Image (cartoon, rainbow, N blue to C red):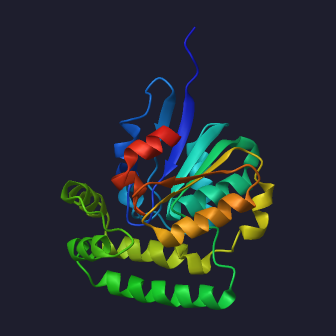
Amino acid sequence: MVPVMDTALMVHGFAGTSGTWLPVTRLLEPKRYRAVIPDLRGHGQNSAVRPISFELCVDDLLAAAPPRFTIAGYSLGGRLALQAALKAPERIERLILISTTAGLEDPALRAQRLESDLLLAERLKRLAIGSFADQWLDGDLFRVDRPEVNLAARGEILKNRPGDLAAALSALSVGRMEPMWSRLGELAMPVDVVAGERDERYVEIAEQLAGSIGDAVLHVVPAGTHALPRSDPQALAAIL
């Protein structure tokens, strides 16, 4: 009898593509998992898909998956994975949240973040994609001190177009997102919350997430960065 494979729906972050997850999927047990890795609206092969909104992106994810599946989301993808789990909890076998948040509860902070993201989106429209990639990867949040890893990440960003990324950033800013902290207690499926040790702000958020979700398991990857699918694929594959 052929064993039934589990489906792992993997959701990339802002400015990534489905290729973000390739370092992880190469390490997964091939007979155990069938990886489904869609490009989000405004990214990769779905760069031109409009309109862009949280609700439509979540609907896309649910449409790409079978009736029951594991979902793993990184950064922006984690916020979307969380929303998918709250929208269709009966379909989620397991939820894995990586370097992500449940939103900003303070309205003033949301407004401030939205303003900042809209300014970045306007600047993005005027940049060549290569220039944006260099600036993005040189930021404290996404810097990985391994040239070969950064080269691969730059290649992923170059699969996108500046105007499309600007549209995605404007629509999917955490400043536009309804905070979900008050709903975390609804999650009854197994949940893993993951952050890199060097990503101190998100370690703190991960601790808050895990503490708010029943029996959630917290994983802090030693010496890990925010960009865990790139910097620490072995750790993520082991968690999966």
Could you say which quadrant of the image residue 230 lies in? bottom left
- In the rendered structure, the answer to whether residue 49 lies left or right of residue 213 reads left
Residue placed farthest to the front in the image?
A: 222
Spot occupied by residue 224 in the image (x, y as percentages of width and height): 41, 58
Could you say which quadrant of the image residue 141 lies in? bottom left
152 or 206, nearer to the observer:
206
Spot occupied by residue 105 in the image (x, y as percentages of width and height): 69, 80
- The number of numbered discs placed on residues in the rendered structure image is 0
Vertical order, 231 against 28 (above or below): below
Vertical order, 24 against 228 (above or below): above
227 or 40, nearer to the observer:
227
Residue placed farthest to the top in the image?
A: 1
Spot occupied by residue 159 in the image (x, y as percentages of width and height): 28, 60
Residue 19 seen in the current view = yes
Residue positioned 38% across, 60% down in the render = 16
Residue positioned 36% across, 68% down in the render = 142
Vertical order, 104 against 226 (above or below): below
Could you say which quadrant of the image residue 156 lies in? bottom left
- In the rendered structure, the answer to whether residue 18 lies left or right of residue 187 reads left
Vertical order, 145 against 27 (above or below): below
133 or 206, nearer to the observer:
206
Which image quadrant: the N terminus? top right
Residue 53 seen in the current view = no
Residue positioned 31% across, 74% down in the render = 136
Residue positioned 64% across, 68% down in the render = 102
- In the rendered structure, the answer to whether residue 18 lies left or right of residue 159 reads right
